[in-house]
Image: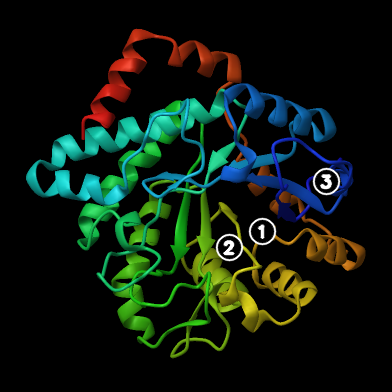
Amino acid sequence: MTIGPLMIDVEGLALQDEEIKRIMHPMVGGLILFTRNYKDTVQLKTLTDAIRKIRGHDFLIAVDHEGGRVQRFREGFTTIPAMRKLGEVWDKDPKRANHLAFLIGQIIATELRVFDIDFSFTPVLDIDYNESTVIRDRAFHNDIEAIKALASSILEGLKEGGMRGVGKHFPGHGYIKADSHLSVSEDERTFDEIASKDMSIFISLIKHGLNAVMPSHVLYSAVDKHPAGFSSFWLKDQLREKFHFKGAIFSDDMSMKGAILGGEMKDRILKALEAGCDMVLLCNSPQLVDEVLLHLDWKMSSENISRLLSMKGTKEPAEALKMIQEKGFKEMTSQIMAM
């Protein structure tokens, strides 16, 4: 079955009949896991195996596993610090901070690959302006060069562990106070200011091989009338055409309040796809997923499919399991837990 443009979620620790039907739908191409989907490592392996049995390996399984307060799996996994901790290390010893960032990326990827999870939506590339209620310590730093360096190290570590990274939230969510999960969010800065600061981080990492981007649900009102995730200006004119980005574009969750400017749910999904997203996330709303699947008819291009399949995990679960059992891996995790 060809990969579809929708990434959905499930409610509990095991698949229910109606969830199996959704996963089997040709418009569905991926599934994101949350804390509610995790009890222990045995249960997680059973769940991901069940998903693979239904849809095989040309289907994406993802999770938000950044560290700090955004780490969906806890017991049985290394506790990853908030990325701001790396920024604090950077202020004292940049070389050590980059080393620790690499280890964090490698640990995240290796531990998730044991369970055949393809990727984590990480790293956060937003600048810490000390304003945002939702970004805060998820950001590495308020210094652009520090963010570029630490994020690059995270991405290298993820690659070593068998995963691609997803830079978020393009072109930058750190400046505004509002949380786009909870409200419509507006950034009134000029394009030049955004481009020279926030967006420059994404562009730098794209030049160094960033594999995927997640746009924000923020409305940059001085630039375009649509929030970034619904904006062909941001996704096509800037990312694809001006900066020649060849990677995948994943929308942020369409159930967030910040996405309400996209209209009714079925309209939001279409607008995001038409604007340039390869895959659209719709979470925490199973009834809305069913409604969307009744009407959604989107033909995936060969480029869409290729970009999404490039996000498949590259390290086999058995290889990842062998690695986490080695003494060297335990030494790596000890360095992180001592931060």
Q: Is residue 265 above or below residue 162?
A: below
Marks 2/1 in contact by CB < 8 Å: the verdict is: yes
| Left or right placement of residue 280 versus residue 93 in this view | right
In this view, the residue in front, 312 or 307, is 312
Q: Which comes sooner in the sequence, label 3 or label 1?
A: 3
Kindly identify the residue that appears in the image at 30 percent across and 64 percent down.
127
Quadrant of res 130: bottom left
Whole-percent x, y for residue 71 in the image: 45, 43
SS assignment at label 3: helix
Quadrant of the image containing the N terminus: top right
Looking at the image, the residue that sits furthest to the left is 92
Q: Which residue is mark 2?
A: 252
Q: CA distance from mark 3 to mark 2?
A: 21 Å
Q: Is residue 9 above or below residue 265?
A: above
* Label at residue 125: none
SS assignment at label 1: strand
Marks 3/1 in contact by CB < 8 Å: the verdict is: no
Q: Amino acid at mark 2?
A: Asp
Q: Which comes sooner in the sequence, label 2 or label 1?
A: 2
Q: Nearer the viewer, mark 3 or mark 1?
A: 3
Kindly identify the residue that appears in the image at 40 percent across and 70 percent down.
173
Crowdedness near tag 1: few (<14), some (14–19) or many (≥20) residues, C-alpha within 10 Å = many
Q: Is residue 272 above or below residue 50?
A: below
Q: Amino acid at mark 1?
A: Leu
Q: Which comes sooner in the sequence, label 3 or label 2?
A: 3
Kindly identify the residue that appears in the image at 68 percent across and 59 percent down.
284
Q: Which residue is mark 3?
A: 19
SS assignment at label 2: loop
Q: Which residue is mark 1?
A: 281
Q: CA distance from mark 2 to mark 1?
A: 6 Å
Quadrant of the image containing the C terminus: top left
Whole-percent x, y for residue 178 in the image: 42, 77
